[in-house]
Amino acid sequence: MVEMAQVKATPKTYDVVVVGSGAGGGVAAHVLSLAGAKVCMLEAGGWYDGTKQSSMFQWPYNAPHRGAGGKEKPFGYFDATMVGGWQVPGEPYTNAAGSEWKWWRARMLGGRTNHYGRISLRMGPYDFKPYSRDGKGFDWPITYEDLAPYYDKAEELIGVFGTQEGLENTPDGKFLPAPAPRGFEKLVKQVCDKLKIPCIPSRLAILTKQLHGRAACHYCAQCGRACAVNANFNSPGVHIFPAMKTGNLEVRTDAMAREVVVGSDGLARGVSYVDKKTRSDTTVYARIVVLAASCCETARIMLNSKSSRFPDGIANSSGLVGRYLMDTVGSPVGGYLPILEDLPPHNEDGVGGMHLYMPWWNYQQQKAGKMPFARGYHIEFGGGRGLPGPGDFGGSEELFGGGYGVELKRKVRRAYGAFVGFDGRGEMIPNADSYCELDPNTVDEWGIPVLRFHFKWSQDEILQAKHMQDTFKEIITTAGGKYFTSATPENNWGISKGGEIIHEVGAARMGDNPKTSVLNQYCQAWDCKNLFITDAAPFVSNADKNPTLTISALGWRTSEYIADQVKKRNLPA
Amino acid sequence: MGENQKEQGAVSRRELFQVLGTAPALAAATAGSGLAQSQEAHQKTYQRKLFDEHQWRTVRVLSDLIIPADDRSGSATQAGVPEFIDDWLNFRKQEDGNDDLSAQVLGGLAWLDRESLRLFEKSFADAADAQQKQILDRIAWLGRAAAEDQRWVAFFNKFRDLTLNGFFSSKIGVGDLPYLGNTAVAEWKGCEPDVWARIEERMKNGYKGLGGEVKPF
């Protein structure tokens, strides 16, 4: 191959190059640089430090369009995601006919950990062996017990609040104290007690006590705007900046990874990236390559890493890179609970997220064959006297029949705080119709081929969405409320679009057989022993438990394995 | 134990609130293009994007009919609702790639004038308060409206939603509700006892609210 004039090679060789700076890249860089490795991290977006760039305490009425979300800032003007969203300028993706996958990307240091919901749920023992339980999907090559010590470590570093409950397939963790519930949450718990749905303190990566020099939460409910005092988990503040203090971590921002460079021996030599500022191609050399660019972006880099050794993309002899892509099942119902009208004014901001949630409760009925679908969901809910925004006060026709004038003004005032919203977060079973591949025609502005998505829900997910709808309606009506939903049989019970819940996992799954998996149980590529993945691409299934904590634990386990293998000289050092 | 740890805790709590004190200023300095500005300043310097002079008058009159001043807070125009609606319609046009919402609102405003001229020989904005309400009473309640007025009920419903969203997300509206957060809380205690007592009492004895009757449970 002819080397082009503008291709520059950085002569230094690092121990490890990590692609991505979110939950997965952050934990790998943190663990490996603290273990003494010289690490170079590539981030496709710009620098971000929430302690300097948070928009905490700003008021929507001082922002354009009262802080509403738009194409540039889908989660609102004050959201921490500076560059990112469902579309990234200059970086398209495509959908095959009949598919409507949505791909959220955050181009910034820390990736999606800057704005995410901080929900931190351990997968349970059943979740690692779903095929063995119901014959659908695939088993993981590891058990809960294999990962449990790393859940401990992850929780102890990032700080997660919660309570010891001992519920089925809902493992407890190393928790900080949970914050007391808000009024509407206590009410919903009473209703759930009546309906025999467990409603317990949620588990969020927000500090209710000081931890490792980070301040405790001050309860402004604005975690999504980034925290100026670093009281919530975000990869820069918790993983990256402390790792940089060791002197072992170098971070390169605006570095858009393009391909893994391979030597004639079939080992990875480093990563080529486009420096977005100069539009020049650069290669960073390293003895070990860790991909953590986010599930789909990692698959994209692998598929784009074609060589004579790997004609179908690096480490893809199984043909499974990009395959069995999953998201989470979502289906919402809104409610109006008159019992919450006209309460004495009080501040119920709390932490940036729910104080209570409902883990899946039908394992036994499912086992007994009494449920019409496989796998389960947990319930997330919100409401109360939140920060008033420009989308919060519609619907007076449905609620009051209409009206205007002083009487209407009083009604809306009384109704403030009486709205609740329920959303399910359910498990999707991997299927052969859901995958990503390189689009044969489209490239991004950096000249890198883009992904084309294929996506399909199965009946298990659709019937789960129906069950969500029925359950949420029952909770709302039991509380004497009115429900609002746009779900119908025609729209598959309001089921979310693929990718919309931003829990994409899979696409380079781990396993115990090189023919039916991309990675071994240490997230090491079968075909290329110095290539590892620490984002959600190795996931074999997508339990209802939000992926981030499992990314952290699995990434930690992989990083320790790398350090150990280097020590044992099984990997190049 | 004790002293040392306590002192450390106290210091960091003090530091925390120092950091919190400077955070908004920092954020304002780094927010970049489309910089946030105070609502008062925004209202004073606002340049209309959609409504012409006559429509603007009508919007001001109509939004104040929906949210007048009362003993607790100011009116829609005092809260900047007309500016909000004008900007919002333009924003939706950009975001949605069509101007369906603007068309519905402008069409509804045109109808108000048409009806008012037919009945009172005055534009809606120039009609007397009672005359304006006579027209609104036809379209303000879905259940009471005549079938042929249905599309104007839909217009009014949309305009009412815009007015309420603009009012209650304004500085005046936030104070009216009142929303008491967006601030640092030294110690989170959960639902306040008097609030929970009220909820519990309603659960036990039932509650007849605006949005329906709740039976005891």
Image: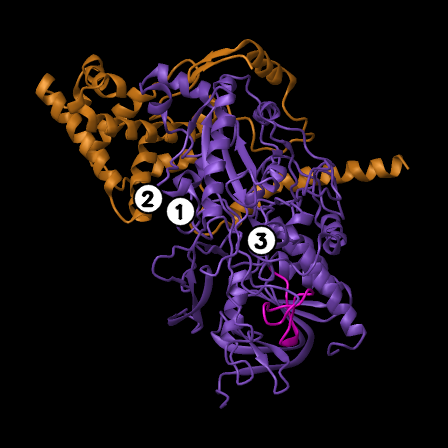
Label 1: element kind: loop
Q: Quadrant of residue A518?
A: bottom right
Label 3: element kind: loop
Marks 1 and 3 close (CB-CB < 8 Å): no
Percent coordinates x, y for residue A262 in the rendering: 59, 81
- Residue A135's mark? 3
Label 3 and label 2 in one chain: no
Q: Is residue A61 above or below residue A227?
A: above
Badge 2, how many Cα within 10 Å: few under 14, some, many 20+? some
Tell me the kind of residue under disc 3. Gly
Q: Is residue B47 above or below residue A323?
A: above
Mark 3 or mark 2, which is nearer to you?
A: 3
- Residue receiving disc 1: A70
- Residue receiving disc 2: B91
Q: Residue at x 60, y 35 (%)?
A: A358
Tell me the kind of residue under disc 1. Gly
Subunit of mark 1? A
Badge 3, how many Cα within 10 Å: few under 14, some, many 20+? few
Q: Is residue B204 magenta?
A: no
Query: Which mark sits nearer the N-terminus, 1 or 3?
Result: 1
Label 2: element kind: helix
- Residue B90's mark? none
Q: Main secondary structure of the magenta part?
A: loop
Marks 1 and 2 close (CB-CB < 8 Å): yes
Q: Residue furthest front?
A: A368
Subunit of mark 2? B
Mark 1 or mark 3, which is nearer to you?
A: 3
Q: How many marks?
A: 3
Q: Quadrant of residue A314?
A: bottom right
* 3D distance between C-alphas at marks 1 and 2: 9 Å
Tell me the kind of residue under disc 2. Phe
